Amino acid sequence: MEKIRFLTGERPTGRLHIGHFAGALQSRVEMQNTGKYEPFIMVADMQALTDNADNPQKIKENVFEVVLDNLAVGIDPAVSTIFIQSQVPELTELTTFYMNLVTLARLERNPTVKSELKTKDFKNNIPVGFLTYPISQAADITAFDATVVPCGEDQLPMIEQTREIVRTFNRLYGETLVEPDAILPDNKHARRVPGTDGNFKMSKSLNNCIYLADEPDVIKSKIMSMYTDPNHIRVEDKGDTKNNPVFIYLDIFGKDKAKIKELKEHYERGGLGDVVVKKYLNEVMQEFLEPIRENRKYYAEHMDAVYKIVEDGCKRARSIAQATLKRVRDAVGVNYFETIKNLKK
Ligand code: TRP
């Protein structure tokens, strides 16, 4: 049976955290392990540079951190291709072709870009590269003829833009590119993990993350100081479990569903203190993160092997992107000398 190719990845702006795990890493590993897919995992360093042009060192430092995080959670280099975006320059040329198929107004309407613009404070100095990153993301996906993109909800606008680009391209130049579908994680909680501070999103810039590489004492202190229900002041008070990150994490990472249900009921009734719940969450998270941290350490002690994995991945990714680029150039007709040679034959 032919395998279904998927492409996914993240920007190397920091180490990956439990929000990345629930929103993206878990489902990509599960998909890999079904044996039905041919996974491509891309470290999106070029995309990371679109809003970090003044700090390339940060990106450089994190490329292999992100690789290690992927390996630690179970990405198997024998099955999956791990590569770095900048090492496949064909993606840039594809982006240039696609840029002509997208309007400025359409880019400005992209909801994910819009909300990022709000938090980034570019004012009137938005880098062109940043505004156009959804186009380069379309190149990432189509270069590999990926039919599915496992991702979080925030990436849906990118997939939609990719589909539009594919349709426009195929209409103008003939059937050339493949339209991808997004695959979201199925547990609805797992799509977005709030921060330890109760913020809507776990994010490095908000300093509210639990990292996959965090040591046990760090995990514990982060959990014990987590935000809970601000109206749950005394133990006897009735508490809210719905907008309470402690319970949201339990739902996502806890295995003992019966126990969690009981804790929730007790908390909602009143009479259950935050410290008790946090201690239990700490147990749950320690158990979950320990094997990941150990795997990560193993790979970090064998960096030569990791470099080889990624170097091979880049080569393989590049040869596939080259073939797609050839198809695209042929479709648009910018293959002058080949055409001349063919005429002479
Ligand atoms: N936009 C993704 C992020 O912010 C990274 C990314 C770049 C990506 N190209 C992609 C994800 C292609 C999925 C498919 O993390």
Image: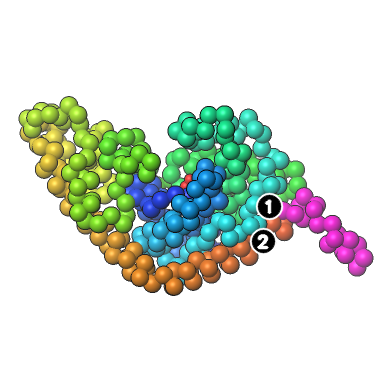
Closer-to-camera residue (203/109) = 203
For mark 2, what is the residue? Answer: 322
SS assignment at label 1 = helix
Residue numbers of the magenta segment: 328-345
Amino acid at pointer 2: Gln
**1 or 2: tag closer to the N-terminus:** 1
Closer-to-camera residue (134/343) = 134
Q: Which residue shows up at 63% across the image and 54% down it?
A: 91
Amino acid at pointer 1: Glu
- Whether residue 24 sits left or right of residue 112 in the image: it is left
Q: Is residue 178 visible?
A: no
For mark 1, what is the residue? Answer: 93
Q: Could you say where residue 44 lies in the image, as x and y percent from the top left?
A: 51, 52
Q: Which residue shows up at 87% across the image and 64% down it?
A: 342
Q: Is residue 127 visible?
A: yes
Question: In the image, is residue 339 part of the stretch drawn in magenta?
Answer: yes
Q: Could you say where residue 177 lies in the image, as x and y percent from the top left?
A: 66, 51
Quadrant of the rendered structure where residue 129 is? top right
